[in-house]
Each structure stands twice: as C-alpha cells, then as structure tokens.
Image (cartoon, rainbow, N blue to C red):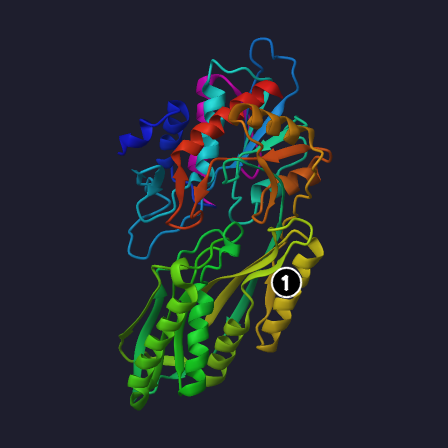
Amino acid sequence: MNQNIKSLEPALIWNYFYEICQIPRPSGKTKAIQDWLLNFAQEKGFESKTDTIGNVLISKPGTNGYEKKPAIVLQLHMDMVAEKNADVTHDFEKDPIDTYIDGEWVKARGTTLGADNGIGIAAQLAVLASNDLEHGPVECLFTVDEETGLFGAFAMEAGFFTANSLINLDSEDEGELFIGCAGGMNTKFSFTYQTEPAPADFFYVNISLKGLTGGHSGDDIEKGRGNANHLLARFLWHENVETDLRLTHFKGGNLSNAIPREASCVIGVPWNQKEQLRVNLNCYLADLEDEFGDIEPGLKLEMESTTVPEDVLLKSDSNRFISVMYASLTGVIAMSNKLPGLVETSLNLASVKQSAEKEWIITTSQRSSVETTKHALSDRLEALFSLAGIPATHGDGYPGWNPNPDSALMKKVASTYKDLFGKEPKVKAIHAGLECGLFLEKCPGLDMVSFGPTMRGVHSPDERLHIPAVAGFWTLLIESLKRI
C-alpha cells in the first residue's frame, strides 16, 4: 500500500484517487467500480441511478444560497485502458494499481496508471463529498466502456441527466480548454490462411520488436512514435524479397486506441541464409535508431533461435499478409486546414491477434474531425485489404464534437482560469475522441467544455499524472462551479 499518494494535496481528491486505484476497472469489467459508486451515493445520502448498460448518475443539490441556480453535469468515464509491459505480472481484473511518486509525477509500476480517467472520478467524488463548496445542483455522470468504443455514451438514453451544461473532465493538458474533438471508427480484418509442414532444413527464429513508447492513438499520434506492427512488417517485407522466408506466427499490439509498443513473429529461412538474416536485422536496427533518434530511446529489436514449428503459412498467404501489413497506412494522414497544429485525420495499425485456428484479426483505428473523411479513410483501407483477399468489418464509430467558439460555458471557465492564474487558457480542439459528440446528438443545444490536469504517456505503461497540475485542476473546477 502506497501511503505517499494519500499524503498529497489537495488531500480529498488524492485520497479518492488512491481508493479508485484499488478497484479493478478495465474496459468491459466495470461492475466493481459501478457498485462502489452506488454504495458511495447511498452512504452519503445522494440520489443515484443506473441505466441498462451500467452508466451511473449521482445528484447533489445546490449548496446554501445556490439551490435554484442552473444545474450542471460533471462527466467522465469509469473504465481504464489495461496495458502492461510484457515482463510484468498483473491481472487487471483482480489486482490494484501499484502507484508510486517519481518527482512531480504519479506513476504505476509496469502498467497503465488509470489516471485516464481515474483522476476525473476522484474530482467528482471530492465535489460530492465536500461540505465547504459553493455550487448549484450538480449531476455527476460516470459512463462505462469509453476506451473501447464509447459504449456507455452510445447506449445512454436521452433524459438520463437534466442539466443543459456539461463539463467533461477527460482532458490531459493543464491550461487548455477543449471545445471540440475528432470522431472515430474501428475496423477489423479477418485474415485466414492455410499451412503446410515446416521445412525441417530451415533455421527458425523469434524476432521481437519492443521498447517503443506507444501512447494514445489520438493524443500522441502526431509525435512521430514508432508503430511496432508496421515496423516489424517492414523488416519482414524486405527479408521476404531477399530470402525464402517462411512465416509461422505474428502478433502485436493490444488495444485499438493505443499505439502498439511491441510486436513479435516467428520465421524460418534456409540455413545458408542464417548469417545474412542476422546481419540484416542489425542493419535494420541501426536504421530505426537513426530514423527515430531520441523519440524512441528504448527501442529494441531482438532475435533468438527457436525449435522447428509443426507448420508454416503457405508462401502465398505469407506474402499477402506481409505485403498488406507493410502497405497499410499508419500515423498522421492529414492536418487540419481550419485549426493550425491540429491533426485532422489519422490511422493506427493497432493490433494483430490470433482469433481462431488459422485466423488472425487485424484491428485498425481511424480518427478524423471531418465525418466524411473518417469514412473515406475506412473505405480506402477496406479497398487495400481486399486486394489481398482480406475482408473488413467496420464498427459503428462515433461522431466528432464540432467546436462552438461562442460557448457561454467555455467563456465562463476561461475567465475563471484567467482570474485564478493570471493568464489566458488555450482554447482548442483535440484529436482524441471524447463522449461529448454523442451527448450533443442526444441533447441538442447542450453547452460543453472539457478540461483536466496534465497527463503524459496515456494508454501505455509510461502513463503519469502531474502532481502540481492536479491542484490547479481542482481549484479551477470548484471556482467554475461557484461562478456558473
């Protein structure tokens, strides 16, 4: 148990964050945190309710003198991305997050921290539990399974909350207010293949590409970080041209909204090409180190011999898999021509997983602030993979949130920020997906703004939460609630 987290200030929000870190809540497995929230409401005497998918709403009346002020919704998601380093033993459905303090940052040992969006949950609970705040009626909305497709926001019925203004607490940069976000869509490609007996006179190796930074496939996509799936496919493509390569295994990445940090494969080459394979691998590693420089300081490309497998992919199937993986787009596709510096459209070659015998599922994530462009990019991917005979299944996706620079709520929060900190906040749109677009569909005219404390490395085991920023975030939140 790490008492250091509980000793931080503001004490109330950090104590609740510590408690939340003890409750397993990976996407799709949020019942424990749902039950905890409902028990919290009952113990505090607040009205609460849940819907069929598991969203939770806890309502607190206005404080003395503020009872008749307009209500406001505080909103966030209760699930977290479950990512860990390959050498870490951790069960996200059972184990608490092992937190620690490193200078000005709170981190987790070898796993995601869950500050996205655990610190938002902690802030809501602190507002609900505080007896010395001034605010109108507050509705605290906790949605489920945001990280895997915004399922809670999708399924929430209109009228679940009553307020006409909403503060989303799911942003990750102190001093920035967000009034827009990209829409997104996931696509799954089913690659089925046939095998033949593995040539016994080949040299077989396991190749691992690991140590990449990874990160959020929306927030971090413009940082130029390596995509493990794409970089490993690039090496295989060149080897496939030069050698009689046989592929037997490939896996990489985990979640659609995380840039893949690790990928591995098992291949075989004729014994007389063994040394050339090792030379080529070392040369490729040198190329990657030169290309990525300080961006990927932990990059590793390792090879170790392995036993002869029972079978390998047919050469034709191996060729089409390697070719389509290397040909696939990934990273930033286009920058916005309306908001300088904003990524408009991106693609993440997210994961390759064994789904069934002789079937791999390749998952991609497309994001765009332009709805038609999001669909066009998805169609373009489908066209590419169809050339390799690989069918696509597109998810429903979610809409973007069109910025409203005239938002009264944003202007109120912005003026509050300036009064508190003596400087103007940056008003921006974000390339990551927020649930606000879906709320706007269900509640036309809803006025919204999003802000939060500084986080880095989100959706990766490098996730960290900036301690000083939490204090500023809390001060801005409670003063905004007083003024709205």
Is 373 in front, or is 55?
A: 373
Which residue is found at the position 36% from the left and 31% from the top? Answer: 19
Q: Is residue 357 visible?
A: no
**Badge 1, how many Cα within 10 Å: few under 14, some, many 20+?**
many
Which residue is found at the position 69% from the left and 28% from the top? Answer: 408
Looking at this rendering, what residue extends furthest in the top direction?
65
Within the image, what quadrant is residue 64 found in? Answer: top right
Q: Give the residue type that dot 1 points to.
A: Ser
Is 48 in front, or is 290?
A: 290
Q: Position of residue 358 (x, y in %)?
A: 45, 73
User: Considering the image in quadrants, where does the N terminus appear?
Assistant: top left
Is 344 in front, or is 322?
A: 344
Q: Is residue 319 above or below residue 328?
A: below
Looking at this rendering, what residue extends furthest in the front direction?
422
Q: Which residues are magenta?
A: 28-54
The residue identified by callout 1 is 378
Q: Does 472 sit left or right of 151 as displayed?
A: left
Q: Position of residue 363 (x, y in %)?
A: 52, 62
User: Considering the image in quadrants, where does the C terminus appear?
Assistant: top right
Q: Is residue 90 above or below residue 268?
A: above
Is 31 contained in the magenta span?
A: yes
